[in-house]
Image: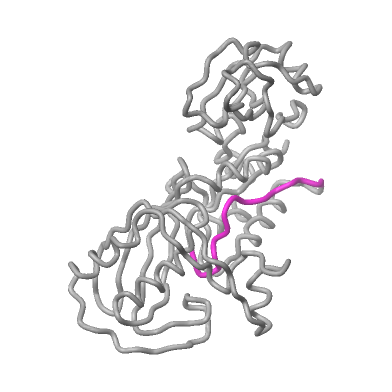
């Protein structure tokens, strides 16, 4: 059986697995003894579950675009206990009494974190510090002083309160650490806290409801796995597209840089990136040239090989 077309595979990661481990399982199931590039767009911690967007073949070129999309999570904050990892897997570093808190007060406090906020990533994270992953330094007991960064939280909804547990639904931009958000909220509520559970429901336009369970990847037939695959053209459904004829498409694949006027189609002022489509295949992703009025040369962020799209 042939390998899948380049694109993405939506996986519902089970608790206890690493994102890298899921990637290895997919690669093993699909490569059939040959080299086959597989990656993912947005790490999920081992204790977390939910949507992991796995990138297949040339789909790995889409990582930055998919990771930039909005995310949605279900999270359970446990007040009164804090760990060095800010989740259930770490060593307890603080225990504090949980004050009497009304649901209205919790909701009011949580709303302070909506919008653009400053956030410090957890020491146990994949952020690079002094050339190494922060978690690698933290595991060795070395100091990790990560810089604050600006992230966007679109909304925090408090689903239920059963102290010391607070169930939340969070919509946020890429790069937001829910563990840090939960720990900061716990301190604002007069205690300490850690994430008890975390589940990613959505990433950009993709929903975990359409994902294959990571536990089924090896036991399912390869056919069933491929049926869940999303081809390159459909991997960025929110991005606008321009149809390119076969002759121009081949010239672009050979390195030709056309002018925007050659594409014979205007693009919206709001579009920063645009897909170029040839037939039913993704040809390239182009970046709009600001200030050139659409008459300048097209700048390509990614160009895709035809032969790899079977």
Work out whether 121 lies above or below 144: above
Q: Residue at x 53, y 46 (%)?
A: 68
Q: Is residue 213 left or right of residue 154?
A: right
Q: Residue at x 34, y 79 (%)?
A: 79
Does the magenta segment cover residue 35?
Answer: yes
Please state the extent of the stretch shown in magenta in the rendering.
34-48
Q: Is residue 21 left or right of residue 110?
A: right
Q: Nearer the viewer, residue 212 or 133?
A: 133
Rendering coords of residue 21 (x, y %)? 65, 62
Rendering coords of residue 178 (x, y %)? 44, 64
Q: Nearer the viewer, residue 8 or 301?
A: 301
Q: Residue at x 62, y 21 (%)?
A: 277
* Figure colour scheme: one colour
Work out whether 191 lies above or below 294: below
Q: Quadrant of the N terminus?
A: top right
Tell me which secondary structure the magenta stretch mostly adopts. loop
Does the magenta segment cover residue 196?
Answer: no
Q: Quadrant of the C terminus?
A: top right
Q: Is residue 63 left or right of residue 3?
A: left
Work out whether 69 lies above or below 193: above
Work out whether 269 lies above or below 159: above
Rendering coords of residue 224 (x, y %)? 58, 43
């Amino acid at each position: 059986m042939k390998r899948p077309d380049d694109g993405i595979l939506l996986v519902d990661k089970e608790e206890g697995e690493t994102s890298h481990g899921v990637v290895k399982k997919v690669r093993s199931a699909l490569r059939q003894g040959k080299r086959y590039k597989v990656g993912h767009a947005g790490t999920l911690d081992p204790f977390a579950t939910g949507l992991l967007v796995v990138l297949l073949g040339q789909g790995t070129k889409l990582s930055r675009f998919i990771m930039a999309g909005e995310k949605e999570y279900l999270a359970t904050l446990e007040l009164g206990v804090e760990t060095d990892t800010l989740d259930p897997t770490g060593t307890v570093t603080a225990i504090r009494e949980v004050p009497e808190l009304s649901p209205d007060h919790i909701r009011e406090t949580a709303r302070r974190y909506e919008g653009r906020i400053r956030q410090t990533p957890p020491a146990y994270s994949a952020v690079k510090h002094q050339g190494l992953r922060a978690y690698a330094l933290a595991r060795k007991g070395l100091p990790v002083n990560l810089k604050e960064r600006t992230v966007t939280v679109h909304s925090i909804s408090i689903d239920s309160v059963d102290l010391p547990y607070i169930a939340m639904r969070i919509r946020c931009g890429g790069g937001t650490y829910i563990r840090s958000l939960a720990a900061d909220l716990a301190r604002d509520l007069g205690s300490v806290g850690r994430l008890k559970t975390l589940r990613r429901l959505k990433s950009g336009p993709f929903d975990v409801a359409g994902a294959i369970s990571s536990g089924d990847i090896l036991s399912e037939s390869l056919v069933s796995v491929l049926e869940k695959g999303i081809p390159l053209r459909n991997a960025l459904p929110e991005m606008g597209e321009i149809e390119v004829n076969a002759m121009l498409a081949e010239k672009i694949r050979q390195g030709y840089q056309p002018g925007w006027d050659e594409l014979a189609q205007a693009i919206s002022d709001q579009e920063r990136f645009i897909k170029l489509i040839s037939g039913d295949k993704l040809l390239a992703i182009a970046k709009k040239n600001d200030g050139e009025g659409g008459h300048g040369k097209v700048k390509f962020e990614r160009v895709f090989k035809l032969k790899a799209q079977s």
